[in-house]
Amino acid sequence: RLFSLTSDRARGAWDSSPVPAPTADAACSPPVAPKAASAWPSNPRALVFPYPASLRLKQGWEYDTLFRTGSRLKGRLVRLLFVKAPDGKTRFAMAVGKKIAKAHLRNRGRRVLKESLRRLHPWMKEGWWFACMLNEQGLRAKADEVYADLGALLKRKGFMKDDWPGAIWYQ
């Protein structure tokens, strides 16, 4: 670039003066240290369970089937709809009504539900579709409380495997 466009604060006009050449001091400055690597993979206590797109219900007819014919369970913070999956794969949907709270709370609620389902999925029995919804108390609750409530609902109805360690958020 030969010219820089900088604003002249006094007049509000543009100045097209040449860009000064870099000085020797700038060339000799120490290099910037690279960002530290994430501690996530090196943490031996962390359990890595992905939440791929294949775990989500995506088609409209899947939601219709679930909401029209599904059975319902209600916990303290979470409402759960479930139906036997025609394809034999366990998949999830998350729903938060617009009349419950403002957008930032609904978004947080979806993130908390997604994380809870991601942690519970490895211990769930195959062959069911689930829709999880938070009530207004659930939107304001802590993530470990939502996880415990959802885990208790699934365990009570028999959707969890026998080797599930329980609702332990910090593992």
Image: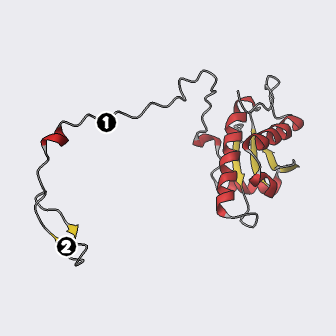
Q: Residues within 10 Å of mark 1 (few under 14, many from 20)?
A: few
According to the picture, the residue beneath numbered tag 2 turns out to be 14
Checking the image for residue 165, the label placed there is none
Q: Measuring 13% from the left and 68% from the top, which residue is drawn there?
A: 16
**Quadrant in the rendering for residue 35:** top left
> Residue pushed farthest bottom?
11
Q: Nearer the viewer, residue 97 or 39?
A: 39
Please state if 117 lies on the left or on the right of 167 as rendered: left
Image coordinates of residue 125 in percent, x first then y, are 77, 32
Q: Residues within 10 Å of mark 2 (few under 14, many from 20)?
A: few
Q: Nearer the viewer, residue 170 or 120?
A: 170
Q: Measuring 72% from the left and 37% from the top, which residue is drawn there?
A: 88
Please state if 103 lies on the left or on the right of 67 as rendered: left
Q: Nearer the viewer, residue 75 or 31?
A: 31
Image coordinates of residue 80 in percent, x first then y, are 81, 48
Q: Measuring 73% from the left and 33% from the top, which residue is drawn there?
A: 169
**Quadrant in the rendering for residue 170:** top right
Q: Quadrant of the C terminus?
A: top right
Q: What type is the residue that disc 2 sits on?
A: Trp
Q: Quadrant of the N terminus?
A: bottom left
According to the picture, the residue beneath numbered tag 1 turns out to be 32
Image coordinates of residue 124 in percent, x first then y, are 76, 32
On screen, residue 134 above or below 127: below
Q: Secondary structure at mark 1?
A: loop
Q: Between marks 2 and 1, how big is the CA–CA gap? A: 33 Å
Q: What type is the residue that disc 1 sits on?
A: Val
Image coordinates of residue 108 in percent, x first then y, are 66, 52
